[in-house]
Each structure stands twice: as C-alpha cells, then as structure tokens.
C-alpha cells in the first residue's frame, strides 16, 4: 500500500501591495484541514480535484489529506500563516512516516514576511522531514518564479500549460499519474530546470507569439521517455532575486535528454524575447472601439486592477470614463467596496443611495472614489458556484454584494474581492452577460476561458494600476540583473 500525503498551499504574492495576507484572507477563500480538503475539492476543476480523481479509488493507494490553503493574491503572506501550514505538513509527514509520496499543489510565487522564497522554504522543510527516499512532486501555477531551492527539493514540478488556466484539473491528474507510475516502478523521473532571464508581461498562451511554445511542449511530451515539459512564465509583480522565466523538462531516467529539451526551449524564448509584448489600449481608445461595434458583448479587460494579480479590485479609472461618456447597456464585474455594499443593504432594493464608490485602497494610483447616486437593483449574499472551465464547481463567497444602476451601467459591488473569470458572477446577480453590449471585467486573461465563447470583441485596457503591464515601468529593487527588458541583452 502506497502512502501518499496530499496538500495545497497557494499564494501569488504581489510585493508592491501593502495588503497583508493573513489567516483571515485564507479563511475567506480556502482553509481546510484533513478530510475537509477531500469533501471540498472532490469533483472540482482544480489540481487537487484532479489528483483525487486519479488516486481516490486506487486499491494500492492510501491518501493522507493534510491541509488546503489558498488566498486571493495580495501582499506577503503573514509569518504565522506560513508557520502554521508548514507545521501541519511537517507534523503529518513525521506522524505517518515512512511515506512513499508527497503531492503538493503550490503556486510558485509566494513571498512571506520572512522570505522571498515561500515555496522553496516549504519544499526544503518537507524534504528534511520526509528524507531523500520519499518522492516529492508539486503542481505550480504558470506564473511561478521557480527558484533553485524549489527545483532542488522537489523531484517533479509541473506548471499549468495554459493562460487562462483552464487545465488545472488536467495538471493535477497528470502529476498524480506520474506519482502512481513512479511508485509502481514503471518510470523513474529526472527533472531539469533551465532559468531564462526574461521578465514576461502577462501574455495569454493563445497569443500568436506563445502558441508555438505550447505546441512544442506537447510535441516533446509525445516522444518516448519524456514525461512532462512546461514553461513557467514568472510573476512580474514579485520583486525577488530569482524573478523570471523557467523551462522544466522531466524525463524517464534520461537527464541528458531533459537538458537538451530545456536548453532548446530556453534558447527559443530568448530568441523571441523582443516579440513577447502585449498590445493594449487606453480607456478612451477602447471605448471608441466599443462604440463602433454593432454587436455585443464587447469586453473591456481592466488589466491593471486585476485581483488575480494582487490588486484590490476597487479601481475607478475605466468606470469613471464609462459614466462620463454615458455608456448604455453595460455591466461591470466588479468594484470591491464593503462600505458601499453596506449602504446598499441599509437603503434596500428599489432605493436610490449616495455612494463614494471604489477608490479607497490606492486612490492616487487606481483612481479616486466615484461620487454618485445609484439605484439599488439587487442585494445578495454574494455566494455562487463557478460553472466554467477554470475552478468549475468551486464556491465563491463575496461575503455580501449588491447590483447598482448608474445611468445605463449595472455595477456589481462586493464586500470581498475575486477575479471575475466565470460567467456565473453575472448570472448569480441577475445579469445576462450575453445581452449586454459592454462588459467591464477586472481580469487580465483568465476571463477568456469562460467569456471567450460569448464575446464579440475583447479590448485590453491599460490604465494606472498595481498590476504592471510593462516591466520597464516597475521600480524593481531586488531582482537579478541583468535581465530583459530592464537591460538590453
């Protein structure tokens, strides 16, 4: 009987954010212990959901669920949170020793109050507790900054293939299958990680410049002896020394082949470095284009106030421009503003309320509050279940929410922030997104997985914000140098 620990500890840390990621932040999103991990994440489109799909019913596997902790991206993870999760994991390893395998669901861009390498520190503690004979494998977000400690203390790392991350459950199944085959003795993985000194802007893998790399990864994986190949894009808002891209190649007992693959992909990325740039618009350019579109919905992507990258989701630049231009038949997801939600609840549905909407966290950067009178159309408990390809089946809890009407614009206002990458955020608030001419989404790319099929046009809007689109505009202090595009290389 193979004894396998399974655990999750995720956070994408924006080191330029002053919002501390504490226990409350984790409990608002996901903090489950032991069997609760299984009950919450079974049959979900997540990495842990995929691991459970593969392993739960295997007769020679005994699963030991420990902890699942995940919080919305923001500033560094509190030291006591990291100590708690690390302690639970290390304690379980020692209590259930000897173990055959440890499966972890990590992000790869966690920075804590005490360290810029959260996952490296965690994997080091896991390896020290488990010993060298236990197989340690982990899934990582596509935006991981893979450090030397991470690659040293894990046997296998697998990044998502896609951005939007519609393949989370697939990567969970993939790593579980690799673990199962390894323990049964049919393969013996070896891994090579090749660092590439590029700070990559948040580009979708659907972009023409990146699609060939995904195709090449899959071509390698179709050849004998290659178990998995992935490219970590890095997270540009984490100002750490080992910021940057990484190619990961895992083969069956063939380190030379893994090295060749990693070197070839890294060389191609470096050759194409000058092409790895997004094409964005100003807010007025985007609204002009939206007005020209005869059919909707037209989606405006608020790139720089994306909660999925650590921004608070209360920026007002684009909404203010929409109000000024008297845009009609539009909907916004979302403005995170607990005070405005409370005002709507107190006023009640059907009433008009004066609001100072948004602009409370970083007003000088993300825009000042919008002084307005708004009609309260709906008040909700803010709970809905994702229906799309990303995290399908996962329950989102916005704590409390409201829909307010400002002219011809319906705005979802929430007490808790989330990245609106699932269409259910609209349907749960009584809004049919298909019938809207214009949708404003605080998301960079993830929305494309669910909204792509209904969108007539997608316009990327860049305004001042916390999630930079051009690395050259970021005041880096800690990242390694030289690195492209900060340095011409």
Image: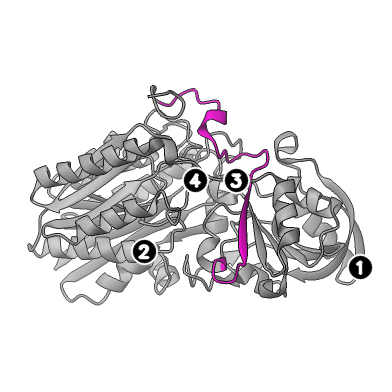
Is 296 included in the stretch rendered in magenta?
Answer: no
Q: Which mark is residue 351?
A: 1
Residue on which disc 3 sits: 280
Q: CA distance from mark 2 to mark 4?
A: 25 Å
Number of numbered labels in the structure image: 4
Earlier in the chain: of badge 4 and badge 1, it is 4
Earlier in the chain: of badge 4 and badge 3, it is 4
User: Residue placed at 54% from the left, 66% from the top?
Assistant: 452
Please state the extent of the stretch shown in magenta in the rendering: 451-479
Residue on which disc 4 sits: 202
At label 1, counting other C-alpha atoms closer than 10 Å, the crowd grade (few under 14, some 14-19, many 20 or more) is: few
Tell me the quadrant of the picture where the C terminus can be found.
Answer: top left
Q: CA distance from mark 4 to mark 3?
A: 11 Å
Q: Is residue 482 left or right of residue 287?
A: left
Residue on which disc 2 sits: 48
Closer to us: mark 1 or mark 3?
A: 3
Coloring applied to the structure = one colour
**Relative height, residue 87 to residue 187 (above, below):** above
* Residue 125 visible (yes or no): no
Q: Position of residue 35 (x, y in %)?
A: 38, 68
Q: Secondary structure at mark 3?
A: loop
At label 4, counting other C-alpha atoms closer than 10 Å, the crowd grade (few under 14, some 14-19, many 20 or more) is: many
């Amino acid at each position: 009987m193979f004894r396998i620990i399974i655990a999750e500890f995720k956070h994408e840390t924006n080191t330029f954010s002053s919002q501390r990621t504490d226990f409350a932040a984790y409990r608002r999103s996901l903090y489950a212990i032991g069997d609760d991990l299984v009950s919450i994440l079974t049959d979900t489109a997540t990495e842990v959901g995929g691991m459970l799909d593969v392993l739960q019913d295997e007769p020679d596997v005994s699963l030991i669920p420990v902890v699942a902790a995940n919080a919305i991206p923001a500033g560094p993870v509190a030291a006591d949170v990291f100590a708690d999760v690390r302690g639970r994991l290390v304690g379980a390893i020692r209590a259930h020793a000897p173990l055959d395998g440890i499966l972890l669901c990590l992000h790869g861009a966690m920075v804590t109050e005490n360290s810029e390498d959260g996952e490296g520190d965690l994997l080091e503690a896991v390896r020290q507790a488990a010993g060298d004979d236990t197989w340690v494998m982990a899934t990582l977000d596509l935006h991981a900054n893979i450090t030397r400690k991470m690659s040293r203390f894990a046997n296998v790392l697998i990044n998502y293939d896609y951005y939007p991350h519609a393949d989370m459950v697939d990567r969970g199944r993939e790593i579980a299958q690799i673990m199962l085959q390894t323990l049964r003795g049919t393969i013996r993985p070896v891994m090579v990680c090749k660092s590439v000194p590029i700070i990559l802007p948040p580009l979708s893998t659907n972009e023409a410049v990146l699609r060939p790399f995904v195709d090449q990864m899959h071509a390698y994986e179709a050849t004998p002896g290659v178990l998995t190949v992935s490219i970590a894009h890095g997270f540009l808002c984490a100002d750490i020394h080992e910021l940057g891209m990484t190619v990961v190649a895992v083969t069956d007992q063939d380190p030379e082949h893994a090295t060749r693959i990693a070197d070839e992909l890294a060389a191609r990325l470096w050759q194409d470095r000058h092409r790895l740039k997004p094409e964005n618009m100003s807010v007025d350019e985007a609204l002009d284009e939206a007005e020209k579109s005869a059919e909707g919905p037209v989606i405006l992507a608020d790139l720089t106030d994306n909660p999925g990258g650590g921004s608070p989701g209360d920026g007002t630049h684009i909404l203010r421009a929409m109000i000024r231009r008297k845009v009609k038949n539009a909907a916004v997801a979302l403005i995170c503003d607990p005070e405005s939600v409370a005002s709507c609840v107190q006023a009640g549905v059907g009433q008009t309320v004066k609001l100072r909407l948004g602009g409370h966290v970083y007003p000088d950067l993300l825009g000042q509050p919008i002084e307005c009178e708004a009609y309260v159309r709906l008040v909700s408990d803010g709970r809905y279940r994702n229906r799309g390809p990303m995290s399908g089946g996962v329950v989102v809890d916005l704590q409390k929410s409201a829909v307010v009407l400002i002219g011809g614009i319906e705005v979802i206002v929430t007490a808790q922030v989330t990245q609106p990458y699932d269409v259910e955020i609209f349907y749960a608030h009584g809004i049919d997104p298909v019938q809207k001419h214009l949708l404003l989404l605080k998301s960079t790319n993830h929305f494309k997985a669910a909204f792509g099929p209904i969108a007539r046009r997608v316009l990327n809007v860049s305004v001042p914000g916390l999630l930079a689109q051009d690395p050259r505009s970021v005041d880096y202090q800690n990242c390694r140098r030289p690195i492209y595009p900060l340095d011409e290389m």
